[in-house]
Image (cartoon, helix red, strand yellow):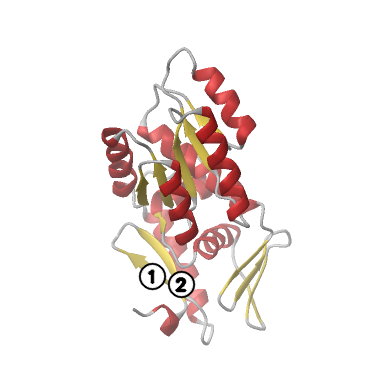
Amino acid sequence: MHVLIVEDNDALAVRIGAYLEQAGDEPDFAYDGRLGLRLCEINQYDAIVLNARLSRARRVDFYRDLHARLDDPVPILQLGHGNADAHRASDEGFAAGADECLDAPFSLRELRRSLQTLVYRRRALSREVVAGPLRMDVDHRMVHCGSRAVELSPIGFRILEMLARAYPRKVTRDEIEHRVWQDDPPRSDAALRGHIHRLRQTLQSIVDGPTIQTVQVAGYKLSMGREDDP
């Protein structure tokens, strides 16, 4: 996930960013809403973590300006700080446009799970997925690469859907396992590696089709050949 952290508490921002980076995500940082908006115009983010200690007026302005500037607004996770105003801040956040609010105390694992849920929810709204020559009809579970139909197992379809929605960015192993097996992942990564291997074999049989690359042993990404070369 490519995540923007809008947080003026440097220590908290660094903790969140370090945890996400260790999990294979790509965090960016903004110390206020104005810089956050500028970064959203430059980069494509999967989700935003927003500091609830911004004044109510600034939070409302941030939500309004974000929706005005982007055709496809990024889901926002607003953080609370566990004080007496936490519930009021959450209510105001939802009213202004936050997609989820997480009040302190919270674990970094819980924060990342909340981000994953927001990202999956957003991606699920799109029922057709296109990545290069690859087209996926989610409702009818159909896959085409160019004019050729591609037959996949149910798990293979879910994995390819995640990779196609994230293209050209990577998807971590943890994200794939959570999507496929929810809260009951296998004890080893052998099951996932087996599904990736079979999916690779299927895609390799397609002339000029996409391939699956392993990214620094942290995850996988779709590659469209030369167009993805640096």
Residue shown at the point (36%, 34%) measured from the top left: 108
Residue shown at the point (57%, 41%) measured from the top left: 63
Q: Amino acid at mark 1?
A: Gln
Disc 2 secondary structure class: helix
Q: Position of residue 86 (x, y in %)?
A: 49, 19
Residue matched to label 1: 213
Marker count (numbered): 2
Q: Amino acid at mark 2?
A: Arg
Res. 192 mark: none
The residue closer to the viewer here, 169 or 94, is 94
Residue matched to label 2: 200
**Could you say which quadrant of the image residue 49 lies in?**
top left
User: Horizontally, is 110 left or right of 96 in the view?
Assistant: left
The residue closer to the viewer here, 41 or 116, is 41
Q: CA distance from mark 2 to mark 1?
A: 9 Å
Q: Residues within 10 Å of mark 2 (few under 14, many from 20)?
A: some
Task: Name the outermost residue toward the top.
Answer: 84
Against 91, residue 156 (above or below) is: below
Answer yes or no: is residue 162 visible. Answer: yes
